[in-house]
Amino acid sequence: MAYDNQKFEAYLDKMDMVTVLVPKSYYDGEVNSLCLMRDGQSLSLKLKDRKVLHEAIKYECYCQIKIEIGEEYQVVEERGAKADLKIGAVIRTPEFDDAFFYNESDLGVVFTKQHIQLKLWAPTATDVKVKLINPKTLNKEYIGMARMKKGVWTAICGLEKEGHHYSYEVTVNGVTREAVDPYAIAASANSEYGVLVNLHKTKQPPVKKAPLQKPTDAIIYEVHIRDFTIHPSSNVSNKGTYAGFTESSTESGVTTGLAYLKELGITHLELLPVNDFDGVDELKPLDTYNWGYNPLLFNVPEGSYSLEPTNPIARILELKQLIRAVHENDLRVILDVVYNHVYVREDSSFEKIVPGYYFRHDQFGMPSNGTGVGNDFASERKMARKFIVDSVLFWVKEYDVDGFRFDLMGILDIETMNTIRQKLFEYDSSILLFGEGWDLNTPLSSEQKATIYNSDKVPHIGFFNDRFRDFIKGSTFNIYDKGFICGNTHRVDEVKQVMAGSVSYQKGEKYLFVQPTSSINYVESHDNHTLWDKLSKCNSHEEKQILQKRQKLASAMVLLAQGIPFLHAGQEFYRTKQGVENSYRSPDSINQFDWEQRKIYNKDIKWLQAVIQLRKAHGAFRFHTTERIRKHMKFLESVPEIVAYALANVEKYGPWKDIIVAFNQDTSTHYINLPQGSWNVVIDGESAYQYPFPKALSGEAAVPAVGVLALFKT
């Protein structure tokens, strides 16, 4: 009887277990004996279990010899029918992880004085070739790779191949797929190929950075490369690019560009993803728009921001020069990184090179989708974790970045995040790490996830504090829900809690974080509606001037709360996205940083600068331990419309002994009783004062309508 091999399937599901699926159309699926063959040698398989499925019978068989993954085997049944043994669920077993974990730091491309070395981790492959393309002549050549220990394949080529494009042709389960090196550090336009680039030729002179003694000293400002300069009034020549971001002499009556950010007083500039992503044609960058959360190559700068997207070295140099310019302006750089997923799992290099390994699967063997984009990166697997750790170290060591914001960090596992923290801390303890700790439906136990509820298990890593966000402004997912700054007085106790860093500021009180360094305080970001768009909806009955005061009140609460403040670019001048909630692919007209608004609201921006300077002026606004908050911070009695706190006996942390700050969300003035003595006024509603302070209060103080009052006593 002729037999169709396609109907007989065999998979290696454990290191010593072969699963065979025999269709019922073939002798009713009945098989009595099976053996494993390699190079003409045969070994009987021991049948352990038999399950009747709908259209086939499933046999689980155990092998008494070690199956060499990466070698070719066949399974033969008693009638002589054969099937190639394919790599199955073994790829996701701890035994596989242990057997093939490669802990060296030389994956990808390494230039030596003699040659160029290429290494690829592909343990399930039976053959790997390097495809080289001369970008000038388009001539192709292939180099066979040799399999080494731990499933690593290696090849070398001459130094004359520098600048050549390359990819890998990887054969797994009898199928050959072409893939870009996941460790690529340079790429051709639109990520078609990796490029052999010697990074030593892109080195930049070191810059002495602005110091950062503790995480709570940071003031983070989130911005998108293209948004920042694309507006017609930016006075930037190379709009929407790395180079445009750092252009000097862009002033037009007021500062713009990087000079504006320095003048604002922030300490850290957070850039939305700058690694290679899909969604924008790098050769026609202005035809479409994207935030950058469609990651392709994690260690390659995005080409759509480059002046020369077809020049692999140009984009590397442009990004390095941007980071250097930021450092020269006494600011630090944080990268928004997206290690929780890839753009399209099936098309990703990870899936093509080691199918089934790098992504999580549910109990039915289907790819999980906690991220909502079709795949979850399996960070808990050793080589997936290694890739993430290697990648963040690469950005720190090669590009001199100062921190990372992890998109959907709750998808990643705790061990991975702690490993990252440890490795980076060994390199530079001032590097900031924080992310989105949302609890998403991915097949990882709740105890393993790097979620906000497990913050105590990942010390020295910050979390976006959604309680702060929602108690201060109202639900971010219900545009009509009102928080404190919108006029809601029902959750004042919760507002006090988040203003105290969301820690247990009094023993026995509830808390979200063990230490205030875990709390990233914010009211808006690139996601969801801007605060101005929300206020315009939920408080639509109020005049524009009142809404502006409410936004300033919110920003002041972000800056004067314990924890780490986070500002969204343009928040200081009432940035609007015309009501668009999710503008990830909206046009520039929606997303652009409006420099005309910056001019119109220069007075409001200067007021926010004063609030930033107030935070910087005294360490009592920036406590990094719960102990200090408990010792020095007390909330004052007041009407529900006011939240007021005192920082007492804090002279060892700054120039003043005592501080009082009061926030009034009502449209009427309210009064608070002051402790004994004369109190100098720093901020009084729309007014901000500097030394010598012209105004002092005692006894009772008026907290201006929808405003802030900040006082101190020496």
Image: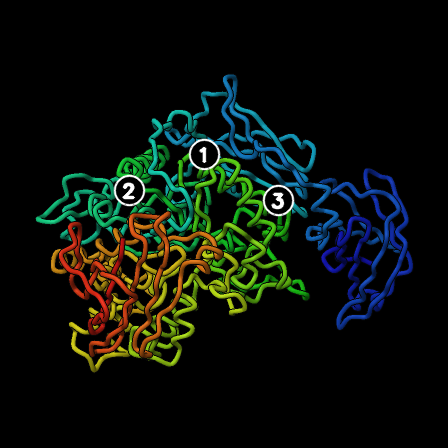
Secondary structure beneath dot 1 equals helix
The reply, left or right, for residue 501 in relation to residue 124 is left
Location of residue 548 with respect to 269 vertically, above or below: below
Q: Nearer the viewer, residue 687 or 6?
A: 687
Mark 2 to mark 1 CA distance (whole Å): 20 Å
Q: Nearer the viewer, residue 45 or 595?
A: 595
Residue drawn at point x = 25 percent, y = 67 percent: 551
Q: Nearer the viewer, residue 20 or 456?
A: 456
Residue designated by label 3 = 383
Mark 2 to mark 3 CA distance (whole Å): 32 Å
Residue designated by label 2 = 242
Mark 1 to mark 3 CA distance (whole Å): 20 Å
Amino acid type, residue under disc 3 in the picture: Met
Amino acid type, residue under disc 2 in the picture: Tyr
The reply, left or right, for residue 630 in relation to residue 210 is right
Residue drawn at point x = 24 percent, y = 65 percent: 709
Secondary structure beneath dot 2 equals helix
Q: Earlier in the sequence, mark 2 or mark 3?
A: 2
Amino acid type, residue under disc 1 in the picture: Lys
Residue designated by label 1 = 397
- Using the rendered view, name the quadrant where residue 631 is placed: bottom left
Residue 505: percent from the left, percent from the top? 47, 64
Q: Is residue 310 visible?
A: no
Residue 239: percent from the left, percent from the top? 21, 47
